[in-house]
Image: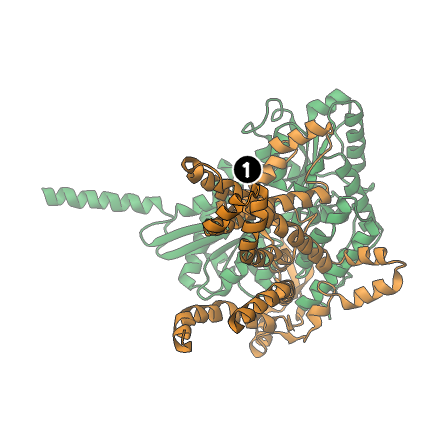
Amino acid sequence: MPHRTFFAFIAPSLFVMLLFIALPIVSIAYQSLFVEHGQIVTTVENCGPFGCETETRVDAEAMRELREEQPMGQFNWLGTYANPSHLAFAEVAAIWRQSDGLWSALRAMLNLPFYKALFFTIAYTAVVTPLVIALGFLIAVTVNAVPRLLKGPVIFFSLLPMIVTPLIGSLVLFWMIDSRGIIGAALQAVFADPQLSLKASPTLTWVVLFFYGVWHHAPFSFIVFYAGLQTVPEDTLESAIVDGASRWERIRYVVIPYLTPLVTFVALIQLMDNFRVFEPIVGFSAQASATSLSWLVYNDLRSGDSPLFGSAAATSMLTIVGVVILLTPVLIRTWRDFTRKSAR
Amino acid sequence: MKALLTASAVALLAGSAAWADCGIEKGSVRILSNDFASLHIIASEAETCASSTVTVTKNQTTEHKNIQVPALTSNPATYTVAIIANNSVVPLLNDGLIRPLDDYVAKWGQDLQPNQLVKIDGKVMAIAFQINAQAMLYRKDMLAEAGIEPPKTYEEILAAAKVLRERGIIDTPLLGNYKPGWDLATQFIDLYLGLGGDFFEPGTAKVAIDNDKGLAALATMKSVSEYMSPDFVTYDSNGAKPVWESGQAAIKVDSWGSRVSGLVDDVDAQPGVAENSVIAGAPTIGGGTIPAAAIWWDGFTIAKNISDEDAEASFRAMVHGIRPEVAKEHAEVTAWLIKGYEPTPTAAGVFATLKAGAKPYPMVPYMGLLHTALGNELAEFIQGREDAAKALADVTQAYNTAAQEGGFLN
């Protein structure tokens, strides 16, 4: 395709991506280099229903003038990235110096808010992504074998977990696993332990979150593989049957190699999506046991009194860096395939 | 004849329309508030001021604290009235988003009592209409069965819980809003105030909770949590309500005065719960006399970035919404500060807490940052994965980082 036609085709998409993705990222990167101005405070008398008191108050007028002069705030260079809520360089160095072994150092590091969130995010991505791919493939192969009459309804029900809004889906599961809910009570009966609660133990909460993640994303993987299965060449399959291959051998030696590019595609999307996990943590009220990078951003912006924009921006940038690092192997592989194909 | 009939019909209708509103000529009233019973009542009363020239709209959401600052910063502001409490008014004051009300009070505030006027630096910035505090709730039938006197201190509560559990009356006798986040932090703040502690070094933004009182408060919270159902980490006030109403607790250590009427009424409750629920003042702790509860006031403010006409209309509509008749008609809903209000039993708990000398929630500009830091960092402690000293150290560090970024510490 001549380059001019190519650019004409992608220009609208490119423009929208520039406006809604590239420019905001630049803006956030810039924002993460600043912190709020030093608050100018005065003491005033505050009288209310409980009597009068002298109290500290922010001088709104002086702050307004300061903000008009320097709207972005105080320049902090990379200070926000290094502070204890983010990469915590000083705290990590102190931990390394003071702890006696690798395990205790790691455990102390995991107490820092950013690393705690990073650990859960990576664990979630590492567990949910392969399970989603495997489960999606399994469902696709199974649905492909279902008789034609039932295929429609079966596909519909397989897609439901993804259609349900993440927050509603997680709330439904949350109520079911409550110790007075159907799953929670059943588990208590099965294990004969009235104190068993899926919500109280961090390990069990993680398991529930992983389970929800797989349940919610499997339909996407299913639909991609199902579409791919329709295009598997019939003659190759027939010659495999003629050669005496069992069903399992047919899947292993014909279907899976044929669908490998789709595995790369689903893995790419899932890695990006799972690294930004957020809704289940809110829906399950799981912040006591599990926090993620996206949840840290949300939390920073939600301290109603003074939202910490610089801190949220820094965590956002670190999330982007994390996603880039995760995707690099996949992207290198895709690039190699691409150059190999065009070299032919 | 037809013309005469039509003219008189129009005159009658116009007359009745004038009787339906509050006499405001023109304006737009846009209310933003939290979402609970007393605020529903006030907003509905304010809505009766609507007419062909006056529009009244409301947005009552638990997210009000997070949207109020951006909403009132725009010009013209999205809302003309922001209903706030002593913690949520702080960001509005910090950013200069609300206007002084002295002129309006002089003109339209004849029914307002002096203790309703919240004056900052000599200017009236908010009109308070209710006070709120956390009261205690207990089941008198369960306590009678175990032969226990109603507890008045946290130590007595823990002793009562032990007896209730040992006698097999109920395995999880205690209940509280212990969800990590805002609710858990509020518990700590209440206990710390009850122990007589100061949150910051006087006159500075340096946090000062890493001391004996902080450790004592945390120890009490841990002991209380051991008598609660293991799902307590998900209990905020809405999450705890069904647990109480299904009769699965004997003592609720904290119930918001503004919500407690919903816990003791017959709606949604299992038989035997509503009539046996008794409201009492907040308990004391550590042998002190100060109740372990912070007092809050709720009131309304008027935005600055709106036209004077809208501001006056909004003030008049809100004053209409908090007039003495409203408090008389809905006396059991909350602890009103309005003229002529006689405290009912549900409000008695709040007033008992106030009278016993409970301290108000601190209104300093950086209290919100400490509240958030407490909410985040106490989660691991309350689940038993961290000790109290480490928890307080984590809170101090989180607060210092946030305060440095917010410009309160350098």
Question: Which three-letter amino acid code belongs to the residue tagged 1?
Answer: Val
Secondary structure under tag 1 reads loop
Q: How many marks?
A: 1
B106 or A50: nearer the eye? Answer: A50
- Residue at the limit of the structure toward the left, as seen here: B1
Left or right for B258, reference A116: left
Residue A260 occupies which quadrant of the picture? bottom right
Q: Residue at x 50, y 61 (%)?
A: B72
Q: Position of residue B132 (x, y in %)?
A: 62, 44
Q: Residue at x 42, y 63 (%)?
A: B308
B389 or A110: nearer the eye? Answer: A110
Crowdedness of circle 1 by 10 Å Cα count: few (<14), some, many (20+)? Answer: many
Q: Which chain is orange?
A: A
- Residue at the limit of the structure toward the right, as seen here: A100
Left or right for B196, reference A145: right
- Residue at the limit of the structure toward the bottom, as seen here: A69
Q: Could you tell me if residue A65 is visible in this image?
A: yes
Q: Position of residue B352 (x, y in %)?
A: 68, 38
Name the residue carrying label 1: B333
What is the quadrant of the N terminus of chain A in the image? Answer: bottom left
Chain for numbered disc 1: B
Q: Could you tell me if residue B35 is visible in this image?
A: no
Left or right for A65, reference B81: right
Q: Which chain is green?
A: B
Q: Residue at x 59, y 77 (%)?
A: A70
Scheme of colours in the image: by chain
A20 or B169: nearer the eye? Answer: A20
Q: Position of residue B221 (x, y in %)?
A: 77, 42
- Residue at the limit of the structure toward the top, as seen here: B145
Q: Position of residue B160 (x, y in %)?
A: 78, 29
A158 or A75: nearer the eye? Answer: A158
